[in-house]
Image (cartoon, helix red, strand yellow):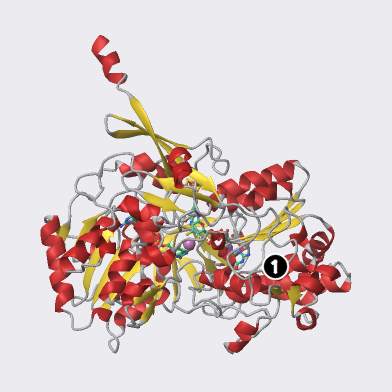
Amino acid sequence: MVIATALSTTPQTTMLGACPHDCPDTCALVTTVQDGRAVKLQGNPNHPHTGGVLCTKVSRYIERNDHAERLTTPLRRVGPKGAGRFEPVSWDVALDTIVTRFKALKHSETILPYSYAGTMGLVQGESMDRRFFHRLGASLLDRTICSTAGGEALSFTLGGKVGMRVEFFAESKLILIWGSNSIGSNLHFWRHAQAAKRNGARLVCIDPRKTETADKCDEHIALLPGTDAALALALMHELIVHDWLDHDYIANHTLGWEQLRERALQWPPSRAAQVCGVPEAQIVALAQAWGTTKPAAIRLNYGMQRVRGGGNAARAIACLPALVGAWRHRAGGLLLSASGHFPVDRAALQRPDLLAGRRPRTINMSTIGDALLDTANPVEAIVVYNSNPVAVAPDSGKVVAGFAREDLFTVVLEQFQTDTADYADFVLPATTQLEHWDIHTSYGHTDVLLNRPAVAPRGEARSNAWVFRELARRMGFTEPCFADDDEALCRSAFAPGVVDFAQLEAQGFTSLALPEAPFADGKFPTPSGRCEFFSARLAAQGQDGLPDHVPNYEAAGSSREFPLAMISPPARNFLNSTFVNVKSLRAIEGEPLLEIHTDDAAARGIADGATVRVFNARGEHRCRAEVSRRARPGVVHGLGIWWRKLGMDGTNVNQLTSQRLTDIGRGPTFYDCLVQVEVDDRSAAAS
Ligand SMILES: Nc1nc2c(c(=O)[nH]1)N[C@H]1C(S)=C(S)[C@@H](COP(=O)(O)OP(=O)(O)OC[C@H]3O[C@@H](n4cnc5c(=O)[nH]c(N)nc54)[C@H](O)[C@@H]3O)O[C@H]1N2
Ligand SMILES: Nc1nc2c(c(=O)[nH]1)N[C@H]1C(S)=C(S)[C@@H](COP(=O)(O)OP(=O)(O)OC[C@H]3O[C@@H](n4cnc5c(=O)[nH]c(N)nc54)[C@H](O)[C@@H]3O)O[C@H]1N2
Ligand code: SF4
Ligand SMILES: [Mo]
């Protein structure tokens, strides 16, 4: 008894950190450590944006960290590509072999680094890795998989990824939650929306799916995917005909009003109602609310820009606050991403100067399937880290065929044996956020966070930065920047004096000094200093200088063969394909499902729980159907992103999505996808 008590009183220490995930909230973490193990993980109660609360996923981060299936040694492939058969090897063997293979290639440009935001950390995501590949002269990667359509659209309109301070949504009187399932993917914004609601604000959710967020809003506008620009233009139409405009703000702080006015007058609500598939009265009422409520704000999110016209739609929506002068108030305006507020010293972190005048080709990550199958401009080696392209990239049939190439040399840095790691020649075990240093900005608030390692790396796991430092050394790169350790990299993320590093060390976070209402007096960071309804920069690229409705490549109702529009937004308890292997979270999500409206199900003889074939010209995916009140007629939802190997036939929804790109930003069009659904004969026969 006495001994047990003594053991359980081993001293506990705490370590401050940051959530690494691709989520706008970038929560501050406190990890409690005992006997060298993480025993508790909490939201930092002192960080106002976190408020001591974490989402369900990350509150299970220790389960993920201590998972029995963590990769703990370097692995070398022994079976055929994709079979997932490996043998352990030492770091020396793995790294020396990789370097030998790289040196044997005629052109370094045939090496492709493939990474995304598995960690959003500046050190483990965009520092030593970039230095290494720049010095090597590898292909450059166009990192488009998530947000470039909306991000570039915002830059063309407002001048950057800038907008409202998230905390002031709590004071708004009208909030449009547009293309965002906030409860699922932006929980800490939702706290502010709820506070606003308690103060009498009206919340309107604009989303084809009746999400848990839509359930809690005052109104839900269930438009068809890819029709947001039509809705925004009709709102403008109503603002004009009812004169709900802030003429003074428009005259002084916007550009191209006369042209936009003409465009918007072509969009009476009746026309938009047809295109959007929603009642005209709903559009008229929304316009009145937007035109007459002050302060009014839009929480725009990336769900609405994963379609052909995603960039134009984001531009159209980004014009709405200026028209009514919403920016005048700190609780008015729009927020898509705050990341442009951070003065990160990317040149210091990434050292593009190491390219030394070379101009390697750029490969778009959203069309990795085609890129790997391109024999004219071959990719001979690929290094994947912070990403799981075999599961998350569109048109998986092609992605898998590309990764299955026997002649492709593939290195994957991973914490787990993902679908992508199965195709590797070498898998290198990566540290987690509890085990490495990093420094973080955010795209949903304006604080900088520091993450210090709380526990030692599991097994032989090493940080990404360590791996690229070692590869650089073995390649014979002697520039002093390849000697920077991870902590030094954290310190070099901001120019001296920009961020108080002592404060970061002491409290884990520090806030940028920013105005409360950034565009109250205009001063947009555009070339004209105005909110650019008309963009000369877009026009110079041969694009429409004004926002317009650009219909989907695969618009709902345009095909008899594939009559249903499929969107595949995130499942609440996964983060993209991360956490799918954490049992307690997978248990909540169950299995891959397709939500379908009762009419669409009945027309196909599909009962709730039936196994269905979802298919189009690109492929087929079998899963369970859920006849669901969350689906509107004509639209089905395959929530993601499951690991392929956990799906019924070793596929996931990306078997169906296409590699076509958005109008602006070269982004993917995951939610621009037509399918047909039918009862699966094989399983029907078996039952
Ligand atoms: N729990 C959880 N949180 C996450 C993620 C996750 O996987 N899980 N992923 C993270 C990442 S990487 C990102 S980019 C963000 C994604 O979060 P968001 O930026 O919010 O984007 P999505 O979740 O893709 O889509 C949000 C909503 O848009 C709706 N939508 C789909 N098509 C359209 C359309 O054409 N118009 C409109 N108006 N709405 C549409 C979807 O039904 C969905 O409910 O969330 C991050 N947070
Ligand atoms: N159908 C469909 N497809 C989609 C989307 C969708 O809505 N629908 N969403 C798209 C979007 S918005 C995005 S952002 C992409 C996301 O796609 P990815 O960026 O590929 O995100 P994840 O699937 O979470 O994979 C990240 C991987 O990084 C690993 N990782 C995490 N931290 C580290 C680290 O420190 N070191 C190393 N080496 N590895 C680490 C994790 O284990 C995980 O396997 O998916 C896109 N794909
Ligand atoms: S995933 Fe988002 S909400 Fe969850 S802990 Fe991380 S930053 Fe916070
Ligand atoms: Mo994303």
Circle 1: element type: loop
Relative height, residue 513 to residue 114 (above, below): above
> Where does residue 524 sit, x and y in percent of width and height?
67, 68
Q: Along the horizontal axis of the image, is 9 left or right of 565?
A: left
Q: Quadrant of the N terminus?
A: top left
Q: Residue furthest top?
A: 2
Q: Residue at x 67, y 66 (%)?
A: 223
Where does residue 340 sit, x and y in percent of width and height? 55, 63
Please tell me how crowded label 1 is: few (under 14), some (14-19), or many (20+) other residues with Cα within 10 Å. some
| Residue 398, horizontal then vertical, whole percent | 34, 76
The C terminus: image quadrant: bottom left
What's the residue at 27%, 87% (across, down)? 375
Is label 1 within 8 A of ligand 1 (CB to nearest ligand atom)? no
Q: Nearer the viewer, residue 618 or 609?
A: 618
Can residue 63 be seen here? yes
**Left or right of 356: which side holds 150?**
right
Quarter of the figure with residue 158 = bottom right
Instruction: Write down the residue under mark 1.
Output: 523
Left of 153 or right of it: where is 676?
left
Q: Residue at x 77, y 73 (%)?
A: 234
Question: Would residue 392 be visible to someone looking at this image?
Answer: no
In x, y percent, where is residue 142?
Answer: 42, 74
